[in-house]
Amino acid sequence: MSHRSCIAFGAVLVLSIAGVLPLAAQADPLYVNLNDWPLYIKTGFDRSAVSQDPTGQAGWKSLPPTGNSGRYARPIELDLDGVQKRKAFSLKRFPEMEFTYSIPFDFPASSALLLQGGKGEGGPVPGLHFAALGDNWEIFLNGTRVRSELHLDAQGKIAGHRSVRDVRFPIEGSILRAGRNILTIRIIADPTFPPQGMHQAEPYFLGSYENIERRNAELIPVLLCGLYLFIGIYHLFMYLVRPADRHNLFYGLFSVDLALYLFVRTHTAYLIIPDSDAIFRIELASLCFILPFVGAFIETLNDNKVLRRTMAYGAFSAALAVLQVLMPVSFSHDLLRLWQFTGLFAAVYYFGYEILGRFLSDGWRRWKRDRDSGGKSGLGLAYLKALARTPIGNLLIGAIILFATAVFDILDALYFQWDLVLTQYGFFLFTMGTALILANRLGFLHERLRGLNANLEDRIDRLAQAGKSLAASERKYKNLFHGSTDPLALLDGQLRIVEGNRAAVKLFELDRPGKARPSLESALYVEEREGRVQADRVHRAIEAQRKGAEVEEIQVKLRTALGEAKACRLRLEHIDSPTGEGTLLRVLPEATDGLAGFFVEGRERYEIENTLQAAEDLCRKSCARLTRYLPEEDAGFIEICLREMVINAIEHGNLEITFDEKSASQKNGRYFDFLQKRRLEPAYRQRRVVLEYSISAERATFRVTDEGRGFDHRAYITEGAEPSPELLEHGRGLFMTLGAFDRVAYNEKGNQVTLVKYCRK
């Protein structure tokens, strides 16, 4: 269903609901609106007086007619004798009281004749409809009891609660008479609990029972509840299959909770749970969780995490839900009022910030990017396109409808008391639109994954065949160094190069006159920050080979003849050579990502120890896919700056090395020894650096977090400022980063930095 169709459908539903009562009045020949007649109320009940007209009698409180505007007749609001006042959030229990409600009304003679004429000929059956009655009650018409919901124990106390919405039942036509009729209602209730008596405004009427049943048909609401339940369970299963997509979990919980909430508001729920207090508690408890689940779904859909403010609001709502179940129902009603006021603020936040704010921000960036590339469309048109074509735009349409209906229902519960419950239809549009968004997203990912799997399987087959061929070639020529263009060399126990093939001779300059046999360690490129990191990795790999480990490849940088760094992989294999035990070295080019050309978007999270090599490898991996959306030169510069920030997190964050300590150790030539010693100290060795990143066609976002004390970044970074003198020696990476990224933001503590680069292709 398109959003335009959904909106039209919603409008039809609302107009239909708004027009039910006038249509009922016009089409029903038996229709009598009881709100057109005075309502008389008094404390106590006399069975012998149920057929007496209270008009003009003393002791009755009279409520004037109100017609279709409705009226409330709650004992707590009527200032009746003996009704005590209850303070808000009071746990005091008040005794039950009896009340008599009486409505004298005239029944037209023409309608009475219609009943007499239809007797035995399939004429209309009269019926009564009450918007709400509570708690225990029985109804008399002209002295005859026509319905009873008294559930009392041996002491006359309420044993089962029956505060029911939409009370409706047929009556015998012979009970009605032309002219004046007396409708009397006996009510037994806790008068301090607001949902007692006639606690909804309207409708209260007499009419054709067939029309009453048609008006209150619950097929659509019950079907909607079943639909929400099915959708919720489906998305919960989706979460079990793929736990990384946490938005499925919260959307599933929201939909199941919504199904429960809307179902207990139907009249059908009373057929399953006869006690109205239990239904009331379930309704309020389920209501408390709807907004937290919606907020968590939106946040995980956008950022794959639940913000702390939503977790706090969820804990608050859960506490309210528990109290709803445990406390007296009058106290639960006070909690409902508390939730309604807080719920208004939460609804405004999730709609205004999480949906509308993000939509406006994304639409602005799309329009600006289109304008920079030569587009001429206006901002308004860009927003209209985003509204129709983007997931956040589709979500906004459903959210507008849901937000409007939710705010209306909260205001209705607080002030209007019309009890229309438009939210059930707003939720329908929101749920259907959101389910469509998730289905389209899943279909897109499925198609991409299927294409990637097919390509990957083909590559695996080719690589397997090539691997078999390469293994046979290595076994045949590894001692002769023939048949390979990759540099191959034989190392002795001290990692000195014994011999090599032509490529190795050229790479390591083995034919240089007067040059002693070089060692592999001397051929490694040493950076200022790394020290012996690469050499240690090589030694560990060779030692593992000697102990029978599997052949592995390690990523290193070799020093070229010009003194530059060349990234490559070393394949080290322990062998028995003619001169004894040794190591066969194969130098392979830097690994390439075969799936880079198919990359669309992704996000990952890593935790690393405080080693510079780990930082190097992690930053290389994190930025490997940037060339999909950025020029290679820009991607390389981003990698350099990201590496600076990760190393800063290790050195100055986790290891708490000050600028003075670093400067002094560098001047003495012992910085790397100092770094190694510091990282092994008990206070620091358990600390980790966390790198989270997400890359898409729109932007690349990196977040680096350390476990240090943070630093006052404001002292070094001000808008448009030049580097301070103390940073010029070894703090330039921070200012390089400011120039490389479009947005650099530190948290308040200073131990987390978020880097954003927009992709302007």
Image (tube, rainbow, N blue to C red):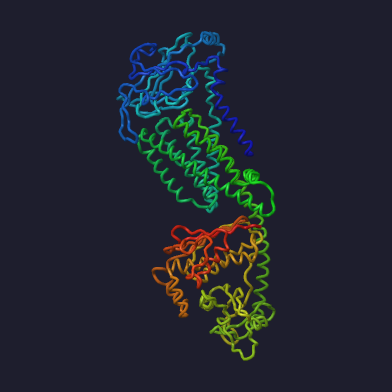
Side of 581 where 106 appears, left or right:
left
Q: How many marks?
A: 0
> In which quarter of the view is residue 199 placed?
top left
Look at the image and tell me whether residue 302 can be seen.
Answer: yes
Depicted 200 relative to depicted 491: above or below: above
Q: Nearer the viewer, residue 163 or 155?
A: 163
Depicted 152 relative to depicted 533: above or below: above
Q: Percent position (x, y) of residue 502? A: 68, 83
Q: Nearer the viewer, residue 190 or 405?
A: 405
Question: Residue at 42% across / 46% down in the picture?
Answer: 315
Look at the image and tell me whether residue 541 can be seen.
Answer: no
Side of 403 where 462 appears, left or right:
right
Where, quadrant-wise, is the C terminus in this rendering? bottom right
> In which quarter of the view is residue 325 placed?
top left
Side of 166 where 625 appears, left or right:
right
Q: Percent position (x, y) of residue 293? A: 49, 44
Question: Residue at 42% across / 66% down in the picture?
Answer: 686
Question: Residue at 56% across / 31% down in the picture?
Answer: 220
Depicted 567 relative to depicted 20: above or below: below
Q: Percent position (x, y) of residue 347? A: 49, 41
Where, quadrant-wise, is the N terminus in this rendering? top right
Q: Nearer the viewer, residue 493 or 64?
A: 64
Depicted 467 relative to depicted 523: above or below: above
